[in-house]
Image (cartoon, helix red, strand yellow):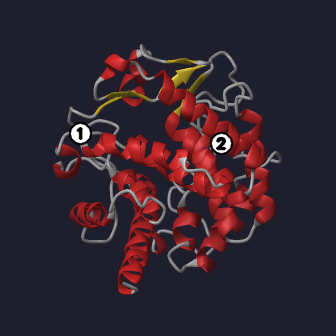
Amino acid sequence: MRWILDHISSSGEPVGASERNGWARVPWALAVSGEAHVAAQVVAWAERTQLAADGGFAPGAAQGTGRFLAYPLAHFAIGAWLTERFDTATAAMGALRRIQDPATGGLPIAPPEDRSTDIHDLLSTAQVGQAAVITGQDDIAEGVYRWITDLLELQPASAGNRFYTFRQGKRLLEEPPKHLEWLAITDFDQPRQTYYTPGMAAVFLSAYGQRVGLKQPLKLASDLLTRNLSGTPEQFDDLGSVQLCKFGWGAAAMSAVDISRDWTPHLIRMVDWFEARQAPDGSWAPSLFLQPSPSDIDRLVKTAEHVMEVNAILGALGAASAIQGQH
């Protein structure tokens, strides 16, 4: 946390904000880690300088190319909500609602102004769903749940440990363009894959299941995390990769609601996983096989994410310890 605080100016501006948006999750990470006043400063700075009239990111560094825009905007909506800027958070969710596919419930990877493609991805869609549960946008969350359940039903029986995470319209995207292949298909038997999607989906499904009082979302979440547990040990052992981080978050989300299994050993294992990848200065970097020379902006993105995830894991371990103490 100290590393993040040292990279935010007195005006609330995070490092590198004039170059690109690496700060969208920073208010969220600060808010859940006892630094609500700094989180509020960052949200206020964003309100002054980074947001468009429709609640989304303004054109320029904040919006960037607009590709995969739903993902960071959902992060910011959660951070704004946690700092009690409910109007800002609701406006951001309104911007997300306008780009959600009304037919499928998915969130697009293309910029909002580009309607030439209807490709939607699990990572962005599940993250928007979680933001919708937190901010009480039930219609958005219901659409996300429908999209995810359809995605799971569309998985081919012959896929084995390959997991397809993109859809184009109503169909599963089994043959994505070459530049999207690594993102759209995860092979859990292979090293250095996008292992994070089951965790992100599990976080949403856990929240949604609690919100609506249904057990089926929780079962789907548990089944998804099993994909990680049945995959290659390199997910946990490869120090050059941080692609597994959301598994820990998903396990933390499930630990309080899934009585069918004990998630505590996995949480403890993930604490060690995060510690092994943390730099001496307290920061985390993206996967080194993807970015061998990360900038401070890259480190801000990952450190904010990992601070939030570690906080969730520690909270889950604390709750588990309290429950065990009652018996």
**35 sits to left or right of 57:** left
Instruction: Give the spatial CA distance, label 2 vs label 1.
Output: 40 Å
Does 234 sit above or below residue 206? above
**Which residue lies at the image location 57% right of the left edge and 64% below the top edge?**
28
Q: Residues within 10 Å of mark 1 (few under 14, many from 20)?
A: some
Q: Which of marks 2 and 1 is nearer the N terminus?
A: 2
**Which residue lies at the image location 34% right of the left edge and 58% below the top edge?**
261
Depth order, front residue of 199/119: 199
Residue 296 seen in this snapshot: no
Residue 60's disc is 2
Q: Where is residue 245 drawn, in percent x and y?
A: 35, 53
**285 sits to left or right of 253:** left
Tell me the quarter of the picture where residue 64 sits. Answer: top right
Depth order, front residue of 136/292: 136
Q: Where is residue 21 drawn, in percent x and y?
A: 56, 49
**Which residue lies at the image location 40% right of the left edge and 86% below the top edge?**
326
**Which residue lies at the image location 58% right of the left edge and 39% below the top edge?**
125
The residue that label 1 is drawn on is 231
- Closest to the camera, between mark 2 and mark 1, is 1
Does 135 sit above or below residue 65? below
Q: Where is residue 123 drawn, in percent x and y?
A: 50, 40
The amino acid on which the numbered mark 1 sits, given as a three-letter code, is Gly
Q: Where is residue 254 drawn, in percent x and y?
A: 44, 58
The amino acid on which the numbered mark 2 sits, given as a three-letter code, is Gly
Residue 216 seen in this snapshot: yes
Does 182 sit above or below residue 256? above
